[in-house]
Image (cartoon, helix red, strand yellow):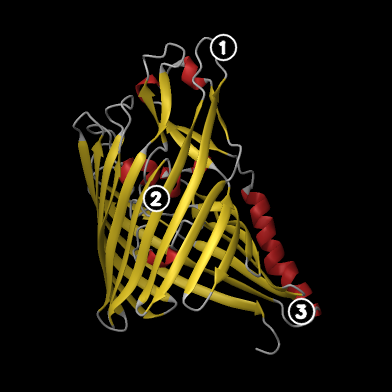
């Protein structure tokens, strides 16, 4: 699978120096200045201990990612593995100050869930780095297509599958009222491609991405008596250029688009529903665990362009219930699914369908402490070779949450 992304050059050592500045130097300066400035350090320390009864990609040993289940028999064998992890541990800083244009706020946050060259490692992973002034936001955070209020209260890091979630670099405008909210954003473009059965062809290896315009995202939220309903959309232009000399020309482009309908509703004083439905083409990079945006399709009638790239349709959704048994005990249960409409030149073991289910029991006697046990299940279906794989995982987690304000407005 080829990744079409702009490179992000934020190095862990520079990010940690920035955090040190915020924690040590910035508070000292704030004390010397007029009231209206503040800085909060927050986060949690989380330890996960669990057992995988089946097989999963070792780089994702502590997350249930259905795309990372075996593509063929015993790909990650043998079955069964215990794991210990602190990769969900998180640290962040919120800072704010008053300006003639209103309050200026900034957030810097990371966890230890290594990605990219650090995948599978306990390593620095930037989550958020953005600033807000009035109705405008600039930087990296959850994008406009994402509804964070429908994320279920689960212990697993990697799911539910098909969840709309992309922390992207963006410029966003938000207009919020008492009963509704709308927002529009321009975002860093990106996509992934699956060269399928032709992955080893030199012609395809000489194809390079060209991103000319940002992705466009928008959302509208309506507050209801017991929760909210939100509709979001995305529009993107995915283009690639072939550097192979004539007569073969594999250049092309596709329009990606999609919609995300989500809602959270308080069904009873103790039970809350969270759900989402998503559909689109070429928007897999906006979703959790949904494989490639672009697939290869045969086009043998055209000798100069025997292969073309197509935006792959994707559909998915999830439904979860959160129930409080007592003030301290609660449970979450739910199911999610994602389905890809594959192109004809994808390999037989390409990802097609994913299923995911959760059941947990959580104990939170006070806000700073959480303990829980969770049963996780995932299943993967391949495109056309008839193979499927599934996995069951048990996870125990302990989490200590903290938040300390180093400086506050003197009037507070």
Work out whether 291 lies above or below 349. below
The image position of residue 256, as x and y in percent, is 45, 41
- Is residue 360 at least partly visible in the picture? no
Q: Looking at the rendered structure, which numbered label has been put on residue 245?
A: 1
Disc 1 to disc 3: CB gap under 8 Å:
no
- Please give left or right for residue 314 compared with residue 246 in the image: left
> In the image, which is nearer the foreground, mark 3 or mark 2?
2
Residue at 53% x, 32% y is 239
Secondary element at tag 2: loop
Disc 1 to disc 2: CB gap under 8 Å:
no
Image quadrant for the N terminus? top left
Secondary element at tag 1: loop
> In the image, which is nearer the foreground, mark 1 or mark 2?
1
Q: CA distance from mark 3 to mark 2?
A: 42 Å
Secondary element at tag 3: helix
Q: Quadrant of residue 328?
A: bottom left
Work out whether 300 lies above or below 332. above
N-terminal of the two: label 3 or label 2?
3
Q: CA distance from mark 1 to mark 3?
A: 64 Å
- Provide the residue designation for mark 2: 288
The image position of residue 244, as x and y in percent, is 55, 15
244 vs 288, nearest the viewer:
244
176 vs 372, nearest the viewer:
176
Q: CA distance from mark 1 to mark 2?
A: 37 Å
Residue at 68% x, 51% y is 14
Q: Residues within 10 Å of mark 3 (few under 14, many from 20)?
A: some
- Please give left or right for residue 399 compared with residue 238 in the image: left
- Provide the residue designation for mark 3: 31
């Amino acid at each position: 699978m080829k990744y079409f992304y702009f490179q992000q050059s934020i190095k862990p050592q520079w990010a940690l120096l920035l955090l040190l500045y915020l924690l040590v130097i910035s508070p000292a300066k704030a004390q010397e200045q007029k009231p209206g400035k503040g800085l909060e350090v927050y986060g949690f320390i989380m330890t996960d201990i669990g057992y995988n009864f089946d097989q999963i990609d070792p780089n994702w040993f502590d997350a249930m990612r259905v795309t990372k289940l075996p593509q063929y028999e015993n790909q990650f064998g043998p079955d069964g593995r215990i794991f210990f992890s602190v990769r969900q541990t998180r640290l962040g800083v919120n800072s704010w100050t008053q300006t003639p244009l209103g309050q200026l706020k900034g957030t810097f946050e990371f966890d230890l869930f290594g990605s990219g060259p650090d995948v599978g490692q306990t390593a620095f992973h930037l989550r958020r780095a953005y600033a807000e002034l009035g109705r405008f936001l600039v930087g990296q955070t959850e994008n406009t297509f994402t509804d964070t209020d429908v994320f279920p209260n689960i212990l697993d890091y990697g799911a539910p599958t098909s969840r709309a979630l992309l922390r992207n670099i963006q410029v966003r405008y938000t207009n919020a009222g008492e009963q509704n909210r709308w927002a529009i954003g321009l975002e860093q473009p990106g996509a992934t491609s699956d060269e399928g059965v032709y992955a080893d062809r030199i012609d395809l290896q000489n194809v390079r991405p060209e991103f000319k315009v940002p992705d466009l995202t928008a959302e509208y939220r309506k507050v209801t008596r017991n929760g909210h309903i939100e509709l979001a959309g995305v529009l993107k232009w995915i283009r690639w250029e072939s550097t192979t000399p004539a007569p073969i020309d594999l250049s092309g482009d596709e329009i990606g688009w999609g919609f995300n309908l989500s809602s959270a509703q308080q069904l009873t004083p103790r039970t809350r529903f969270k759900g989402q439905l998503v559909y689109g083409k070429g928007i897999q990079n906006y979703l959790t665990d949904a494989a490639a945006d672009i697939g290869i399709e045969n086009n043998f009638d055209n000798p100069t362009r025997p292969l073309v790239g197509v935006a792959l349709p994707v559909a998915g959704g999830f439904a979860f219930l959160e129930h409080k048994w007592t003030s301290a005990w609660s449970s979450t249960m739910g199911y999610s699914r994602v389905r890809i409409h594959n192109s004809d030149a994808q390999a037989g073991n390409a990802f097609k369908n994913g299923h995911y289910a959760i059941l947990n029991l959580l104990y939170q006697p006070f806000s700073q402490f959480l303990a829980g046990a969770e049963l996780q299940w995932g299943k993967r279906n391949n495109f056309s070779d008839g193979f499927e794989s599934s996995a069951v995982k048990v996870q125990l987690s302990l989490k200590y949450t903290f938040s300390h304000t180093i400086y506050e407005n003197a009037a507070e």
